[in-house]
Amino acid sequence: MGGTKPGRNELCQCGSGKKFKRCHGGRNVNYEEMISRGAEEAQRKAEINWIQQQRQQGLGRPIIAAQTAGKRIVAVGHRLFQGAWPTFHDFLYSYILDVLGCDWFEAQTQLEHKERHPVIQWHERFLLASKAANLAPGETHQTLMTGAISAFLTLAYDLYTLEHNNDQTRTPQLRKSLIGRLKCQDQFIGVRYEIRVAAMLLRAGFELDWEDETDRRTKHVEYTATYPRTGKAFGVECKIRNQDAAKQANQHLGKFTGLVSDALKKATPHDRLIFVDLNMQAYPYVPGGPHDWRTIGINTLRKFEAQPKAATLPPAVVFITNYPDHHHLDTQVPDAGAAVEGFKIDDYRTGQFLTLPQKIEMRVRNPEVEALVASIQEHIDLPSTFEGEIPGLPSNRLLIGHRYQMDDGGVGTLEDACVMNDTGEVALIIDQDEGGRAIYTNQLSPQEFAAWKRYPETFFGQIRQGPGSINDPIELYDRLKAVYVRTPKEKLLQFMGEHGDRFAALTQPELLDVYVQGMVNSVMERAGVQEVPVHIQRMKPPSTRAV
């Protein structure tokens, strides 16, 4: 097997961070060691990309792509696509044209503007933004993610997710039904939301079984979602307020509870997950403010639950969502996302204070819902790269094991790095070429700092457990448990000192749980009383996104 020999002044391929001439390009080279270290470096990079890929793409099938002869081949389900796509966004653009049909796009442009399908209107604004960027062929550029661009590409990504992850949506019958309903303006808003929710479930690791839309003998849910790790199935129903209802009663959520009631009446033998989109204009998120649709929606649902007409309705976990891209076509969307609330289910009553053991027990009881909530929190952005790379970072970014020249002229290899504060200042430990170690400080750019917050475990080119901010005690519990998970029982008993004898009969997993809970409770006591109950379950607000 042949290969390209690196230049003598290039970094050695073994991953040591040294120049080739000072490492495996010198005399008396141990080539077996070089091959072994090179393999370890390749495995490390693959593991880093896998972590970042899951963070970007979710728990479904990853993006499958390869480059050959200047072209990129992308597998979607059982189909292969080929093209010169610099980014995954570029591929998604081609993909949605293929799925909906270039002929359909062309026919729609012949209509009067007000008669054109919403997708066509999004597409027109997408083209205007691309034209304004004035890019050369193959060139990439970050563009403001307006509502129109987000709506167009997110629809493409959701359709891709369905075809790539769900065998049923590849069948001619369901595919024809979905695409036909999507092209019909009267049905578009409803089927678009069904597709969005289905894609969210697939990215959370669920499997979907669609119900037969042509079966009119009974009112049934949209699909059944099964969580493979536990085998538990849920009946899923999706509802979205129509445009007129949303405009007439933005603040008071007109027809919202009616949609919840209709959804709960759909037949299913399983526990229920209900998704209801408010379809309303967004405002910057201010908790408890006049436009806080999360709080308004939860309170409205609770009032409905207390009414006599709700007495016969079954329990459900309700996801109240607002994805208003289409209300903000020419600007960024100031707020989007979801809130979860239990309808006759105590585990998911927002604002109910839970002790740490209660929260842990609740997660054990509801692993499927917890996985879905975590995925909705995490997978809020469209992936822009094919293999999990962090987009938009400079080529000279800080990577452990790489050599750098510092501002004082010193040269050395970055041995370790740590972000020190909320401004992106970072401490660097440099192994100097002239001998010894030195500590420097540097400043991450806004793009780099945002990437570090998104990928703290892998940002510096090594897999590091535990960096990044901790938002609440349950995150601290998870972080500490991961640190001590392999600690022998005897060592844990030693850590507990004089209290260890009380727990000597416990197994290692039981003892680990007691020990970690004790550490978290100690931290909470020192932190003092919190203004807001620390275990309230909230969805993360959206980040500022760019194409």
Image (tube, helix red, strand yellow):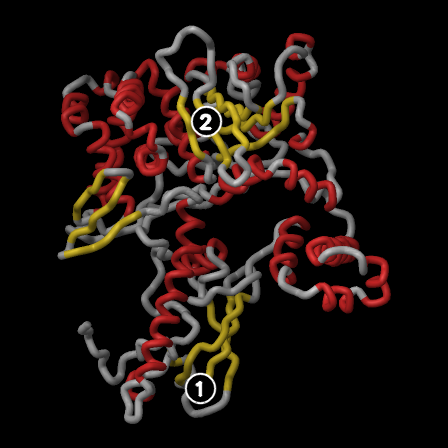
The picture places residue 85, in percent across and down from the top left corner, at 21, 48
**393 sits to left or right of 259:** left
**287 sits to left or right of 460:** right
Q: Nearer the viewer, residue 213 or 381?
A: 213
Amino acid identity at mark 1: Gln
Residue at 46%, 83% in the rendered image: 431
Q: Of the residues tagged 2 and 1, which is closer to the observer?
A: 1
Residue at disc 1, secondary structure = strand
Q: Quick check: marks 2 and 1 in contact, CB under 8 Å?
A: no
Q: Nearer the viewer, residue 445 or 365?
A: 365
Q: Which residue, given by chain and number where applicable, does mark 2 sit on?
A: 281
**248 sits to left or right of 298:** left
Q: Is residue 406 above or below residue 478?
A: below
The picture places residue 516, in percent across and down from the top left corner, at 71, 57
**475 sits to left or right of 456:** right
Packing grade of label 1 (10 A; few <14, some 14-19, many >=20) is some
Amino acid identity at mark 2: Gln
Residue 128 visible? The answer is no
Task: Find the distance from the CA under tag 2 to the CA under tag 1.
Answer: 55 Å
Q: Which residue, given by chain and number where applicable, does mark 1 sit on?
A: 432
Q: Is residue 495 above or below residue 476?
A: below
Dot placed on the residue nearer the N-terminal end, 2 or 1: 2
